[in-house]
Image (cartoon, rainbow, N blue to C red):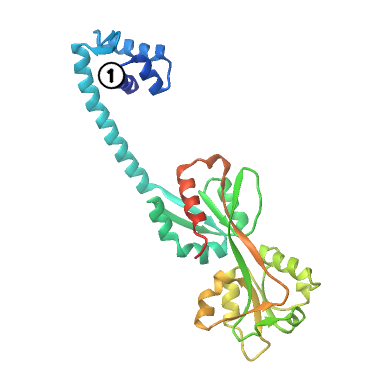
Amino acid sequence: MLKDFAKLGTFLTVVKERSFSKASKKLGVSQPAVTQQIKWLEDYLDTRIVERKKNGITLTKSGEELYRVALRLDKCVVSVEKEIIKIMNKELTFVIGASFTVGNFVLPTCINDIKIAIDNDVLIQVDLTEKILEQLLDKKVDLAIIESPIFLDNIIYREWIEDEFVLFSNQPLPKVVRPESLKNYGWVCREEESHTRRLMAEIFGEVGIECKSFDIKATVTSPTAIKQTVLKSSKSEKQTVALISKQVVEDEIESGLLFTAKIKGLTFKRPFYVAYLKDRKHDAFIEKVTSFIMSRRRF
């Protein structure tokens, strides 16, 4: 029974190009290899199917009949491939791993647009940056979008949008707060090992301020927890403040629930990064999603 459809594909190419040499170039194989495959078919069928002429090739009567059969088979194979792709697309979910601020406050605004752009289901998986990069290396997520750069081998990092931290409170603040006045507030902070806390320490250190000198009311482990703690803090006691990504508190600032201020002489900025494995650099899905995300500079 003939199971090697590749040889029939070679036969169809020879007929279409009307030449063994042109067929070999089209298929990217040597001309002797094309000749050998046609000879194999003739031996299998025990009949001549192709006649070589000076100006090309002609088909024998048996060759004409095989050509009609091969065309029907080729159409069936194409149809089956399309059905398989449909099944794959239904089962395949593109997984984006994201650190907390990106996953909870940035990507939700464009998740539906990403799904439409790649015509595929998309899942956002939120965790610490370290965990997300581990999952990327283990191929449990397809793409990572992170807010703290932990550079590892085998991963490509592309700088995306710039994020900015703001000083905020559930009570009005001066438009500009002097650095030496920061000790007068009660603070809600991230844990010491977090990227946010390290960024605070680094920038405050430039003006000789240590975070340890602040009156820290609470230490929490996520941007959402920081926001909720400040929102619900007492207004009758020392005013509570925190530093957080402006992405996290935009809605509350607009609605008047939270208030922001600048710190004189200090700016807290960081880039978000899109990251993917080096060996998936030319993956069609990765290229499409990355190109779409990189084109979205505002949310």
Question: Which residue position holds label 1?
Answer: 15
In the rendered image, residue 137, in percent from the top left (x then y), is placed at 58, 46
In the rendered image, residue 275, in percent from the top left (x then y), is placed at 57, 50
Name the residue rendered at 28%, 31% in the picture.
Answer: 77
Name the residue rendered at 34%, 41% in the picture.
Answer: 85
> In this image, 221 relative to 91: left or right?
right
At mark 1, the secondary structure is: helix
Name the residue rendered at 75%, 71% in the picture.
Answer: 204
Hey, which quadrant is residue 215 in on the image?
A: bottom right
> In this image, 160 relative to 15: left or right?
right
Q: Nearer the viewer, residue 230 or 34?
A: 34
Q: Nearer the viewer, residue 69 or 84?
A: 69
* Residue 1, placed above or below residue 186: above
Name the residue rendered at 36%, 43% in the picture.
Answer: 88
In the rendered image, residue 264, in percent from the top left (x then y), is placed at 72, 77
Hey, which quadrant is residue 39 in on the image?
A: top left
Name the outermost residue toward the right: 208
Hey, which quadrant is residue 237 in on the image?
A: bottom right
Quadrant where the image shows the N terminus: top left
